[in-house]
Amino acid sequence: MPRTPQEIFESYVYAGPLTRNADALAENFTEDGVFEAPLMPVGAAFPRRLEGREEIRRTMAAHYLRQAQDGRSPNLEKSRYVLHTTSEPDVFIAEIDTVFDGDGEDVAVSLVQIFRVRDGRIARLRDYFAPELLS
């Protein structure tokens, strides 16, 4: 039985933002999967496009190492998301408001992700977030 958008999204979020496990994150993608961050400027430390499961694994492992040094983690009680299905069965959209605990002040981040899936895995993910969040 194929995974639902909810299952795919939750697996992706658990592997990525919550546990920062690049191996688990990469396994959510098809072998030829694509991860895109279209709003990232050319030449930024975080790439605009990653092609293939192994490039996603390698690049996100390095990113998670850098990210671990910032000490921020999402507050699940304050964060929210809504999944929107589309007329195309292999496409869904996640509308996300993530709250990070800060030093005395929470930081809220809003973003949108568009998922295209194939055989229960992510074939293409377009992640629209503010680039300054990674600088």
Image: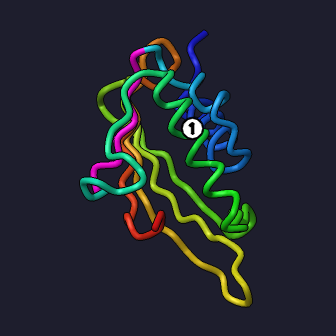
Q: How many marks?
A: 1
Range of magenta residues? 32-39
Q: Residue at x 40, y 70 (%)?
A: 132
Residue at 75% over, 66% down: 77
Residue 51, compared with residue 38, is above or below; it is above
Viewer-closest of 25 and 57 = 57
19 vs 109: above or below: above
**Circle 1: residue type:** Phe
Q: Residue drawn at (59%, 78%), measured in percent from left and top?
A: 107
In which quadrant is the N terminus drawn? top right
**Furthest residue in direction bottom, as rendered:** 104
User: Which secondary structure lies at badge 1?
Assistant: helix
Left/right placement of residue 94 relative to residue 22 reads: left
The image quarter in which residue 80 lies: bottom right
Depth order, front residue of 129/71: 71
Picture colour scheme? rainbow
- Rendering coords of residue 23 (x, y %): 65, 28
Q: Return the residue at label 1.
A: 9
Q: Is residue 1 above or below residue 103?
A: above
